[in-house]
Image (tube, helix red, strand yellow):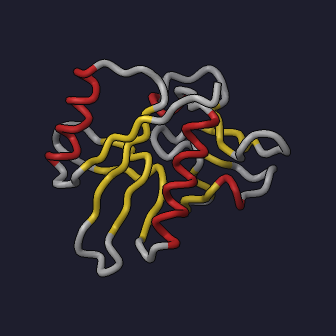
Amino acid sequence: MLTANCNGLRVDAAISAKGAAYHCPSCGQPVTLRKGQIKIAHFAHKPPTDCSWAKGETAEHREAKIALRDAFRKMGYIADYEVEVLSIQGDRRADVVVTSPDGQRRWALEVQHTPILFPAIEARTKAYIAAQVPVLWMGILSRR
């Protein structure tokens, strides 16, 4: 996860400091800030956990979310990663949500780096449709 909660506020791993008490935005359990010289800063659940947000992301997936958010911001859009989209079809945590500069339109970007079955894509897409948020699925290739 690139974001967590700290003292009731959403914080970004890239600008957070080690030592504070961070919690998962979904389950509220403690998470650890992992920030070093090699990997992108991120939060990880402390084991054991059964939180659906605890599934590991690849470094390429995290890098893509950051790159997309930053690119849309440079073009004048409002953009952020790991945003909850609430719908009656099942809440979604969008990889990136982009909002038009006038705030009138928004859409979700889903970055897919690992294999996923069509029923999962369909269910997630239906949740976005129920929330009236168009979604764009983007596949990324591994560097390997």
Check the picture and name the quadrant holding the N terminus: top right
Instruction: State which quadrant residue 127 falls in.
Output: top left
| Tag count | 0
Residue sitting at 22 percent across and 54 percent down? 133
**Along the viewing direction, whichever of 101 and 32 lies nearer the viewer:** 101
Q: Is residue 85 above or below residue 102?
A: above
**Along the viewing direction, whichever of 139 and 82 lies nearer the viewer:** 139
Residue 109 appears at what percent x and percent y? 37, 49
Instruction: State which quadrant residue 90 falls in.
Output: top left
Instruction: State which quadrant residue 79 falls in.
Output: bottom left
**Along the viewing direction, whichever of 125 and 71 lies nearer the viewer:** 71
Q: Is residue 135 above or below residue 32?
A: below
**Along the viewing direction, whichever of 130 and 88 lies nearer the viewer:** 130
Q: Is residue 60 above or below residue 55?
A: below
Residue sitting at 62 percent across and 57 percent down? 12
Residue 141 appears at what percent x and percent y? 52, 31
Residue sitting at 22 percent across and 45 percent down? 128
Most distant residue in the bottom direction:
102
Residue 33 appears at what percent x and percent y? 72, 44
Residue sitting at 41 percent across and 72 percent down? 77
